Amino acid sequence: MSQTVKRSLPFTDCFGRRIEYLRISLTERCDLRCIYCHPSGRGSSLGADLLSSDDVVSIARSALKLGLHRIRLTGGEPLLRDDLEEIISRLRQLPGLEDLALTTNGQRLAGRAAGLAAAGLMRINISLDSLDPETYAKVTGGGDLAAVRRGLEAALMAGLSPVKVNVVLSSPGVLHRGGLHAFAELIHGQPIHVRFIEAMPTCSQSPQGLNGGHVPAQQVLDELARSDQLTPVPGPEGGGPARYYRLNGSVGTVGIIAPISQPFCSRCNRLRVSARGELRPCLFSPTALSMLAALRGSDPTAEIMGLLRKAALRKPRCYRDVAASSGIPAMHVIGG
């Protein structure tokens, strides 16, 4: 598996933030049509997959040479890539890699979780916006909640750890019909970490335009506190910007991620690569750096390292400094 190497000097942006985390989107294709990701309501089995497995490995190798040490594979839906296990296995061989994670909607996870773990995947995030079948199907454009539940159990059985569940607060509905307390029951006896995430206004949407209005993450905590004792705790591995709590001594935790009401840009440590090979300094960056020419060049590693340095220097102080720009793509295009 990955080798331990001596790290280079910290790789920082012009604001002194240490950049150590790279998100690589493997595909724009998806088998769901989530309202916050496909605002037109149209999902697609088609889309750009311009990065080959060799390209993904080349990008990762260059990033690791600069001192980044965490990689997350995203989409679209990365389980639509037949070569996903191959990519994971090859990434785990790279010197300097300390953390390799995956984000999935879980629809196809049950049959592949064991294989992903065997290939070297370390941890997984599963998007699951409601535990009510009707609400889940509405938010996802027809997703099968039972399939995600099977995938969640398979991830736990495969030994992936930690297993995190991402709940995007795209609708006030998650706070009603016992929605929050269903998640509380989910973590009570299992090492599952549920994070409630404020929806980001991509695709020229405002927070108020998201299916009934912006839902502050603090409102989730206030609602849970009505019936549960919340104890602040350190987050699991790869906790990122979330604040975590145990509920009445639960095995798992709940966390909140509040980019709208409590921005954490001052601690941002990531860069993003889309499935089109576009390098984005920020989720809301109005322009991106194409990596395709560098990947096809005579010295890909050096050229990609140069692009990563350039992207780091272009990171804005805060997403709000660039969020008003036009032309921000949908989330499935950027990479979730």
Image (cartoon, helix red, strand yellow):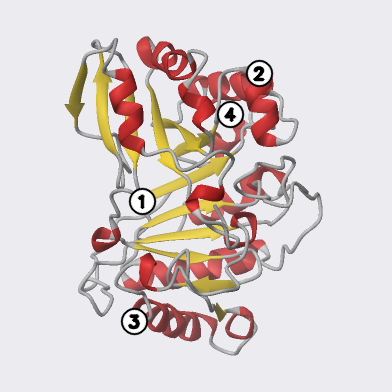
| Amino acid, disc 3 | Leu
Is there CB contact under 8 Å for labels 4 and 1? no
| Amino acid, disc 2 | Pro
Give the mark count.
4
Residue lying furthest bottom:
298
Gap between marks 2 and 3, in whole Å? 44 Å
Residue that numbered label 4 is attached to: 114
Coordinates of residue 198 in the picture (x, y in percent): 42, 43
Q: Say which label, 2 or 3, has the lower sequence index.
A: 2
> Along the horizontal axis of the image, is 223 left or right of 197?
left
Q: Secondary structure at mark 4?
A: helix
Task: Name the foreground residue: 321 vs 84.
Answer: 321
Crowding at dot 1, Cα within 10 Å, few <14 / some 14-19 / many 20+, comes out as some
Q: Residue at x 23, y 11 (%)?
A: 249
Crowding at dot 2, Cα within 10 Å, few <14 / some 14-19 / many 20+, comes out as few
Residue 245, picture quadrant: top left
Residue that numbered label 3 is attached to: 313
Above-or-below relation of 154 to 35: above
Residue that numbered label 1 is attached to: 259
Q: Say which label, 4 or 2, has the lower sequence index.
A: 4
Q: Say which label, 4 or 1, has the lower sequence index.
A: 4
Coordinates of residue 71 in the picture (x, y in percent): 44, 55
